[in-house]
Image (spheres, rainbow, N blue to C red):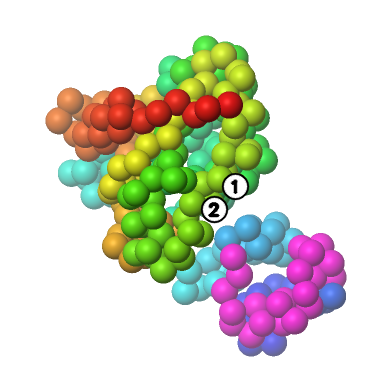
Amino acid sequence: MNHPLARALHSAGLTVIDVAARLNVDPKTVQRWTSGRMPYPRHRDALVKLTGWTAYDLWPGLPRPQAASPTTTEVRVVYPHRSSVPSDAWARLLSRAEREIDILAYSALFLAEDASVPSLLRDKAYDGVRVRIALGDPDGHHIANRGTEERVGAGMSARIRTALVSLQPLTSAPGIAVRLHDTVLYNSLCRADDEMLVNPHVYGSPASHAPVLHLAGAANDGMGPTHITAFERVWASAKPLKV
């Protein structure tokens, strides 16, 4: 019972079987977690709620977000990789939008599969927020190249098609537009007004393994406007999604 997670479960009166049943996983998976295997972010969040311990108490080696230096006030937080971003951070960012929401990615599958996000986008659009979503064209040349780089082949296109299943119904809502692009995507971004989460892409690595920058501010010479300009160029070249 040396691992903090094992101690936390014992303190909470939870057995391996209890946790497996609540999280809908195999008991052997829970045993591996208590032996030191790192759970996926969604399971980490669930274990935090079950035990009452913080994530950093349960997994002391978990990378901590780096606070921005005083001279880079536009950068609020730097996460070492996307999978270390709190799972609700994306929805919380989108919920703060009052004017516009922009999402740029190849698949954004992790957002599309979050049940709260599509309904949140629809509600925001009905409140008058302009919502634009630019995803990769699953038949595009650059999407195929990205699949080859990540060694997933057609898996990249498959992820996009899966995301579109969840997002396509949004196109019937006023104020929401979905387009498909075929560009070399250097960054994915999720923007709400003057605030955004930017996920730089790294050659050969999935986006979930790359850093995420939380930017805020509307300075004309800042990083935010630079990414907004890039989004506008991609958006202008993208094709409306056929429904």
Where residue 208 sits: x, y (%)? 44, 58
Where residue 74 sits: x, y (%)? 26, 38
- Magenta segment boundaries in residue numbering: 18-40
Q: Residue at x 62, y 44 (%)?
A: 114
Question: Residue 161's image quarter?
Answer: top right
Q: Residue at x 39, y 25 (%)?
A: 193
Question: Residue 125's image quarter?
Answer: top right
Magenta stretch, overall SS? helix
Pick whichever, 76 or 186, lies toward us. Answer: 186
Q: Residue at x 44, y 45 (%)?
A: 139
Mark yes or no: residue 79 visible.
no
Q: Which residue is mark 1?
A: 162
- What kind of residue is marked 1? Thr
Mark yes or no: residue 194 visible.
yes
Q: Residue at x 26, y 30 (%)?
A: 233
Q: Do the residues bearing badges 2 and 1 touch, measured as CB atoms within 8 Å?
A: yes
Q: Which residue is mark 2?
A: 158
Where residue 115 sits: x, y (%)? 67, 41
